[in-house]
Amino acid sequence: AQKVTQAQTEISVVEKEDVTLDCVYETRDTTYYLFWYKQPPSGELVFLIRRNSFDEQNEISGRYSWNFQKSTSSFNFTITASQVVDSAVYFCALSIFGGSQGNLIFGKGTKLSVKP
Amino acid sequence: GAGVSQSPSNKVTEKGKDVELRCDPISGHTALYWYRQSLGQGLEFLIYFQGNSAPDKSGLPSDRFSAERTGGSVSTLTIQRTQQEDSAVYLCASSPEQGPTYEQYFGPGTRLTVT
């Protein structure tokens, strides 16, 4: 069975601090995709990144970076120099081929609060 | 361009009534997904469509839930004889094709409250 665990339920930081959101996944499939979505207070899920299981290169996009490590089944997300606008719930998700192809298996989410 | 839209944005209904939730996917997207977000269960997958076909309905919580898609576009999720545990935000997403290689674009959701 597939599972995504986001152990951090809530994180609170002060603006300009760096923060890392943890994501651990479980799957027996060798081909899979990992995603991060952001859900701001407005409620709409916003796609941030997709990574396939064969690409372990870290990725950086502005203040956002992602660290994918198959050895530990982790796909962690770091925000550098956090800003108040980063306050949201962040979801990590897993998707595999087969079954309901493409459906996202979500973690419970991490609520990030960035205080000024 | 236009994103995924859902209607209504909010729905309050009495226990036992039927409700219909609508999703308009991004034009040209062949795959459409329904999810439910509730406090206790987080984000759960319900059903997906490739075109008008729903190959796997096993994610639907009970036989009170059904969904259809017509013309490869609009989808309706119907909940019959609503129960209080059906209260949740129902999210629709679409993607260009089915499968995990495509990101899903989410609508704003329908908040359903069953009183």
Image (tube, rainbow, N blue to C red):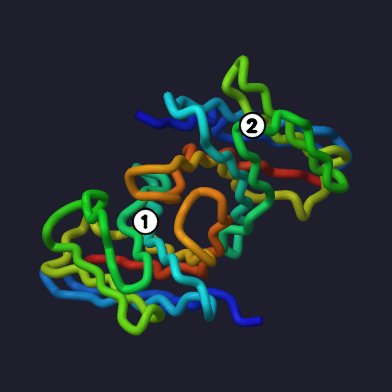
- B71 lies left or right of B29: left
In front of the other: B108 or A57: A57
Q: How busy is the neighbourhood of tag 1: few (under 14 within 10 Å), some, or many (20 plus)?
A: many
The relative height of residue A3 versus residue A47 in the rendered view (above or below) is above
Q: Residue at x 71, y 29 (%)?
A: A56
Task: Give residue B65's quadrant in the image.
Answer: bottom left
Q: Nearer the viewer, residue A5 or A2?
A: A2
What residue is disc 1 on?
A: B36
Query: Dividing the image into 4 quarters, which one contains the N terminus of chain A?
Result: top left
Asked if badges 1 and 2 are on one and the same chain, I answer: no
The answer to whether residue B104 is left or right of residue A63 is left
| Left or right of residue B114, residue A43 in this image | right
Rendered residue at 58%/39% (across/down): A34
Q: Chain of mark 1?
A: B
Quarter where residue A98 is shown? top left
**Residue A31: image location, x then y, percent:** 52, 34
Chain letter for mark 2: A
Nearer to the camera, A94 or B28: B28
Residue identified by numbered label 2: A54
- In the rendered image, residue A110, in percent from the top left (x then y), is placed at 58, 38
x, y (%) of residue A66? 74, 35
Residue B49 image offset from top left, x and y in percent: 35, 65
Distance between the alpha carbons at the discs numbered 1 and 2: 30 Å
State the SS at label 1.
strand
Q: Residue at x 44, y 79 (%)?
A: B24
Question: Left or right of A15: which side holds B8?
Answer: left
Q: Amino acid at mark 2?
A: Phe
Q: How many marks?
A: 2
Residue ID at (46%, 47%): A104
Say if mark 1 contacts mark 2, CB within 8 Å: no
Inspect this view and state whether residue A43 appears.
Answer: no
The kind of residue on which mark 1 rests is Arg
